[in-house]
Image (cartoon, helix red, strand yellow):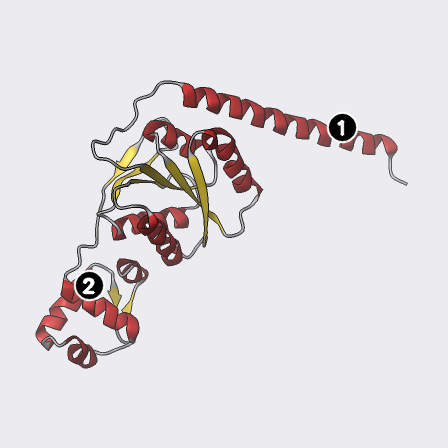
């Protein structure tokens, strides 16, 4: 037989732990609602169109702080295909606070496959109306997912207005990252497309398919290798960055 006093103590402990969690959540929601209602400088845009925030998510604070600074009309959160309790709670908190005044949507992505994360993020960016202004925040969530979203922003450089990160040391500050792009020529794009169709192809095959001289092909592929978009181990193949550049 178990000790009845021990069981009572465990039940009391579980009940107290549950109450503490509920209380913390309640306080957090109240705090965020008051924070949202405070007047803060909001990023202004001269052109017509809505502001869209696409962000990785694990804990809710970075997304809420980014939203209060930006004042978006729409938020898209990248979550895991199988979100754990903490991520589910973060989504719920955001929906219960920001969701009262902002359209909040979620999109499930892979966790560790950077190319697949980037592919999904590019799809989301392409789905937004052309007149909308897209802002990226990569603070919350796993690093692999943040990198995938960052690469998607590079692949759609012309659609993204800003890429932001909130440092852990000072969560109220914002670091704007460079809006880089792959800047590929038409010839480079054709080379990547052909290598993607025929991984392991050699120089002679590529030269015939793309219809450029071998000398020009050598130079173009050398540039793609320097950009880490192409690897020539066992024939020419695209790297992860090369696959993302083709999105």
Element class at badge 1: helix
- Res 233 seen here: no
Q: Nearer the viewer, residue 17 or 99?
A: 99
The x, y position of residue 23, in whole percent, is: 61, 24
Q: What residue is shown with label 2?
A: 224
Which numbered disc, 2 or 1, marks the residue that appears first in the sequence?
1
Q: What residue is shown with label 1?
A: 12
Which residue corresponds to the image point at 23% horizontal and 44% vertical from the top-left?
Answer: 179
The x, y position of residue 229, in whole percent, is: 25, 62
Tell whether 109 sits left or right of 175.
right
Tag 2–tag 1 contact (CB < 8 Å): no
Tell whether 44 sits left or right of 38.
left
Q: Which residue lies furthest to the right in this view?
A: 1
Which residue corresponds to the image point at 44% horizontal and 54% vertical from the top-left?
Answer: 112
What's the CA distance linking mark 2 and mark 1?
A: 64 Å
Q: Taking 171 as reference, is 219 above or below it?
A: below
The x, y position of residue 247, in whole percent, is: 29, 59
Element class at badge 2: helix
Q: Quadrant of residue 162?
A: top left
Quadrant of the drawing holding the N terminus: top right
Tell whether 11 sits left or right of 72.
right
Q: Nearer the viewer, residue 168 or 160?
A: 160
Q: Taking 78 as reference, is 207 above or below it?
A: below
């Amino acid at each position: 037989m178990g000790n009845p006093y021990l069981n009572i103590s465990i039940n009391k402990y579980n009940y107290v732990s549950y109450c503490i969690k509920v209380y913390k959540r309640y306080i957090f929601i109240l705090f965020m609602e008051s924070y949202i209602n405070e007047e803060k400088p909001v990023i202004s845009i001269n052109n017509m169109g809505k502001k869209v925030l696409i962000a990785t998510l694990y804990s809710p604070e970075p997304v809420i702080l980014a939203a209060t600074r930006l004042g978006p009309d729409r938020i898209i959160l990248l979550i895991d295909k199988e979100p754990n309790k903490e991520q589910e709670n973060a989504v719920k908190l955001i929906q219960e606070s920001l969701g009262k005044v902002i359209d909040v949507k979620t999109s499930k992505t892979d966790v560790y496959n950077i190319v697949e994360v980037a592919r999904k993020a590019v799809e989301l960016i392409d789905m937004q109306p052309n007149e909308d202004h897209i802002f990226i925040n990569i603070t919350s969530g796993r690093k692999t997912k943040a990198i995938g979203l960052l690469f998607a922003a590079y692949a759609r450089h012309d659609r993204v207005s800003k890429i932001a990160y909130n440092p852990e040391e000072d969560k109220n500050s914002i670091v704007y990252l460079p809006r880089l792009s792959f800047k590929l020529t038409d010839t480079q794009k054709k080379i990547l497309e052909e290598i993607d169709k025929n991984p392991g192809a050699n120089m002679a095959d590529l030269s015939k398919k793309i219809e450029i001289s071998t000398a020009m092909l050598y130079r173009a592929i050398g540039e793609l290798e320097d950009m880490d978009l192409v690897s020539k181990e066992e024939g020419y193949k695209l790297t992860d960055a090369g696959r993302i550049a083709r999105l």
